[in-house]
Image (cartoon, rainbow, N blue to C red):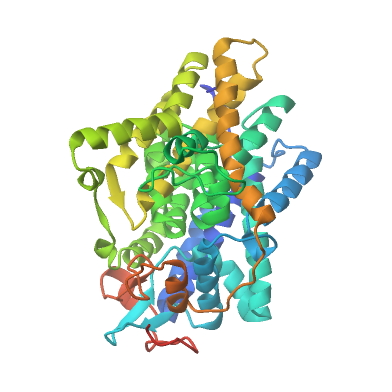
Amino acid sequence: MTFLPTAGTRRELDGLDRAISLYLLLPVFLFCLWFTTPFAITLLVLSSCGAYWALSGGSKASIGIPWPWLVAICAISLAWTAISGVGHYFYANTDWIIRDATLHDLVISAWPPTYIDTDGSTLILRAPTVYYLPSAVIGKMLGPGAANTSIFLWTTLGVALFLSSACRLFETRTQRIACILILLLFGGLDLVGYTWRAGRLPAPGEMIEWWLQIIQYPSNTYLLAWVPNHALPAWLGISLILRHWRLPSLAKVTPLLAAAIPLWSPLAAMGLFPFFLFGLAWRRDFKTLFSPRTCLPFFLPLLAIASYSGMDAGTIKHGWLIRAFDSNAAFLRFYVVFCLLEFGILALLLSRLIRFDLPLRIAVAVLCLLPIYVYGPYNDLAMRGCIPALTILALACVTPITDQKRSLWQTLLLIVLAIGMLGALQEPIRGLIGPRWPTLGKSLPDSVPIEYDRARGRFPTHYFAHPDQHGTNRFLRVLPPGNLPHQESTP
């Protein structure tokens, strides 16, 4: 891939890199307020010092994107985010019942929100919540309506940062336009898979991503419409890794990202891990990575995040996917078809057009491995962990499709991308033609049965956990159960 730094490149963190880092870190500062005052102050001081040392002394040069481009990217981000349903300005998918409820509880309750389980025990909200925290603060000050507007603007900002960061990986105007277009509508051959399984073409706006029912690798339009809280940290993280691949600047900012991203989305962080592992120049930058200034300030915050995220983690559905099939042969058939349609054909075409360098090889390996193991009620590990790898595949398409040397392989690549984009368009089409609906104003336990008809009770283990005293959890500000002003009785 031509957008990786070449040998001998000298590059420091610039203004856009620092903005991305602070965007990911700001909710972590707010998460510190979930702990008792002395411990919260300690976490805030350590995180602030670590952020200052990691982000200071960078480049003051231009970020490499002209102002007209930034204005255009912001306008595109506003439109894309709105049509995706964020903020309920257009039709919002059903996952927003849960997302709205999470934001609702964070606005009206003390932090962290606690609940009463059916057996009378205390439960704590244990889910990737930091995406909502800046908007929850706005909601506490100005009301729930302001929180809804805030989460739209917060998401738009994250999308704009991602598109800007990805865009400047390329030099020419044509490449940058292609980059934005591909990232907006990148997806696998879900349209082919759905048509094959259903025996018909989908209706406009029909859901086609789950054509194999038990697993999916989502398109970018699906990610923004359904799970922006997982997509944004994965997108922003991989854009920083690629821009600073094997440079000292990546080692300098890695401890900050290692503390922030797992709190946003632990599964997206797992998808980013192999790229961090191979993107660092360990021999040269070992001292930078583990220096007292860059690493030690984030050790205690990372421990607090790990302790919180790990509460009752073993109760979440997990196991080998092959056990869901009657035979090894049935699993193998499923595996081959899924991999070919979701990324395999695209990867094979790219192998004929560009050099398969290390990030691309890692991406393909990750995508091959993720379907083997299930974690989460809807195979969440595969859905979230694949985001960085799919983003690399999308970016790898930019140079070959803009190459003026025409070839059969380039034509085939364009056809595959076009079919993927047609499938990805189902999400914005649904956003445009679906009925707009307002936020329901319900708490999370009351919203779970609305979305998940087959949910076992109101407290699924991937959203709630019993607070424990492991690690730093003893310092959480766990108030008496049910600090929400209203919870309906269990059905």
Would you say 464 lies left or right of 486 here?
left
* Residue 313 placement: quadrant: bottom left
* Residue at (56% x, 62% y) in the render: 26
* Residue at (42% x, 39% y) in the render: 197
Would you say 399 lies left or right of 127 here?
right
Q: Position of residue 120 (x, y in %)?
A: 29, 87
Q: Position of residue 276 (x, y in %)?
A: 41, 40
* Residue at (66% x, 46% y) in the render: 15
Q: Nearer the viewer, residue 400 or 308?
A: 400
Q: Nearer the viewer, residue 127 or 297?
A: 127
Q: Looking at the image, can residue 260 be seen?
A: yes
* Residue 303 placement: quadrant: bottom left
Q: Is residue 102 above or below residue 161?
A: below
* Residue 423 placement: quadrant: top right
In which quadrant will I find the C terminus? bottom left
Q: Position of residue 274 (x, y in %)?
A: 37, 38
Q: Position of residue 17 (x, y in %)?
A: 60, 45
Q: Is residue 277 above or below residue 15?
A: above
Would you say 85 lies left or right of 352 here?
right
* Residue at (40% x, 81% y) in the render: 114
Q: Looking at the image, can residue 172 be seen?
A: no
Q: Residue furthest left?
A: 327
Q: How many marks?
A: 0
Q: Residue furthest right?
A: 68
Q: Nearer the viewer, residue 173 or 319?
A: 319
Q: Nearer the viewer, residue 397 or 2?
A: 397
